[in-house]
Amino acid sequence: MQKHLQLTVIALCCSTATIAQNVNPQQQGKSLEENAFTFTEAQLGEDDNMSQNVTILNSATNAYASEVGFLFSPVRFRYRALNQKYNEIYINGAPVNDIERGQFSYSAVGGLNQMTRNVDFSLPFEGNSYGMTGMAGSNNYNFRSGSMATGHRFSLAGANRNYTVRGMYTYNSGFNAKGWAVTGNLTYRWADRGYVEGTFYNALSYFFGVQKLLGNHSFSFATWGNPTERATQGAATDESFWIAQDYQYNPYWGYQNGKKRNSRIVTDYAPSALLTWDWDIDNQSKLTTTLLGKYSNYKSTKLNYNNADNPQPDYYKVLPSNFYDVWGGISRFKTAQALADWNMAYDWLSSSKAHRQVDWDRLYEANRGANQQGADAMYYVQARHNNNLYLTLASTLTKNLTDKSTWNLGFTIAGNKGFHYQTMEDMLGATSFHNVNNYAIGTFSRYSDAVQYDLNRPNALVGNGDKFGYDYNINVVRANVWSNYAETRGIFHYNIAAKVGYDAMNRDGKMRNGLFINNSYGKSKTARFLSGGGKFAGSIDVGHGNVLSLGLGYEAKSPNANVAFQAPEMNNDFVQNLKNELVFSSELSYQLSTPWLHANLSGYYNRVTNATEWTCFYFDDINSFSYNALTKLKKAYYGVELGMKFKLTSYLDLKALGTVSEAKNTSNAHVRYLNSTQGNYKDDEAIVKGMRENGTPLTAASIGLSFHQQGWFIDLNGNYYDRIYLSYSPYYRYATSLKNIGATDSNGNYIVSPQDKGKGGFMLDASIGKSIRLRKGALAINLMVTNLLNNQKIVTGGYEQSRSDYSIKEDGTTSDRTYRFSKNPKKYHVYGMNGMLQVAYRF
């Protein structure tokens, strides 16, 4: 495919020179504008197994922010390394971030490139007309039919990314004589195999909107959705990449009857609709009210096992380094027999691709044997469901008090019911499975109530499609009132904003867990939080294109429901010490605008206290799931950003931008954890001070050339990324664990292993486009190629494995393992050379 892309670039450059040169520059600008919002699913972070989503920001006045979202998206760059919950997204003024997680899922608008072009961006200290801007900025998408470019548009694209083919049709009527405007869009994206082997993609996107003008009123309706089915990619260790000779090695798939099958399939569909009423009260006043609702359906499958060996092809026990100490230092693991075992494991895994993948046929055979013995399924595919019913009402009054001052006042009320449960997706030929906590058998008797997942239906038989393990709802109500005011006085411009909010949340259990008989079924108590804060931003225009700006903000932010419950799959308990986050934000910036240079230099400092983090992982040491909540955590985010755009000639620009940032814990944390086999809480201290935010480069830079003349647009960008940290394991850093291995110095200070990092590096990206005006309409051809040098060593994210390098004996002493989990984090790498060729016709 890489050779094909190179040939395509050459062919495009040669062939388009023979096409007529009657070009509409404005039309070409629109085609490039679409490119800026054409993201692959990997860039948008649709894969829940990878690091957090990219933050998409833009600002016409900021040379850094206007470029960084798209340029750095292949490495999943997050603006100022902030969690996406701080990037607040609106549609027609209504907030659409998931209330439970705080983040917005861009897959909800996947494929709707033409609809999402009409957007208002505001950076952290820029004012807007839809709310107090978030610490990572705010975006408001305009889904009104009358605001979209009129006409028909067909486009067809081929790619070697998550999908290989995309077809799109859009129609916008514009307002007719009777004040009606209609919009429609249909997009289909497909891949039998995505860029990563074992993956596929199948998505249909639709949008329908209508708007009616009635005097000084406007009524808009829109509905959209993106039903998607896709197979995902798993992270792997350096050892697995080395054996497979493939940085995109994917352990989630294998062969069944000679056909490929992936164990991690995601189905995602969030049908949404909104109704917006715009009332132009007079020439200075406008009221906008939006009612928005959606029901998101999200299901993710996973291969699991019961009283059997782990079927994952990259499970540590089958890897060569489990047999021989490749790290040195332990002589009993460096014998001749150990070396022979290493060679045998390596020869087996490297001799055939099938040996490095899931052996589905073997799993079916094992279950047939279990059937003959009357035993439960040894292997099965489970599905985790996270569905949400969301409804929100938002209203904003905008008043132009003078020609230099504007006041906004608004409120939002939202309610969300989250449905969380697990079902049996495929029993892989087995005929029996019971809703019993097999992990707890051993700690408790097989006949104990404690091993029942649901005492209301003990020992229930589970079939395909039946619920088991857990079933609960999370209910959240949120309301806030906000206001902002902006004014310009001579050379001074300022804006102030404030808000007050209320959040309430509870859990409603649908199963009576045997470990928490009186605290798992039915509704929990309700946690309530009062939140609020304010921001100030001011700028001084000192003349000759020089502007100085200062921004300050402080907010008490309610915790999200996804970190509020200690073990939501098991009981109703809230996290201990659950409090509002206290968020301080600040920024000092300088902007220079001249006919030949546009530059921005910004320094920022953000601090978060009372942060709460929650994780759940399978703790193989004790054959148990571990639910971990970290509280009393402090974080700091600070750095410098620079963006410059030089106009070298009328048709050639030089762009340069970069950031050097820090995003880390500035304190240790209190950790409370619960292991699913025991049902009792343990408290400890997590020595996590200095741990960095993961999955985004903290150092990034780009330099590029942009050519634009006679309908041609050619861009070449060289990007550099460094200091990419992996998600750290709190378990490695529990004070008790560190004491067990004697990881303290002579003064009693803990010796903590450094956080694992991923390799950075250089990436070269290019795009070329041509717009041709025809007798009827216009034709646009665009080719985007990412990672021209095919540098796949760059890491985009990953995580430390939450297992220890030792086992604890019955007498409390420790014994070293051959396999070193601390040396083998799991990683994701950037795609190699990949691209998209698109042809669009508009009339």
Image: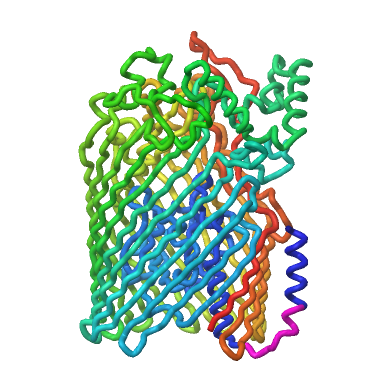
Look at the image and give the residue range highlighted in magenta: 15-23
> What residue is drawn where x is 52% and y is 47%?
51
Q: Where, by quadrant of the figure, is residue 630 drawn?
A: top left
> What residue is drawn where x is 52% and y is 18%?
372
Q: Where, by quadrant of the figure, is residue 461 drawn?
A: top left
511 part of magenta stretch = no
Residue 433 x %, y %: 43, 25
21 part of magenta stretch = yes
34 to 295, vertically: above or below: below
Question: Count the marks: how many?
Answer: 0
Q: Is residue 105 visible?
A: yes
Q: Where, by quadrant of the figure, is residue 314 drawn?
A: top right
> What residue is drawn where x is 66% and y is 86%?
710
Residue 82 x %, y %: 45, 53
Residue 463 x %, y %: 41, 31
504 to 88, vertically: above or below: above
Residue 581 x %, y %: 33, 47
> What residue is drawn where x is 47% and y is 66%?
112
Q: Nearer the viewer, residue 474 or 103?
A: 474
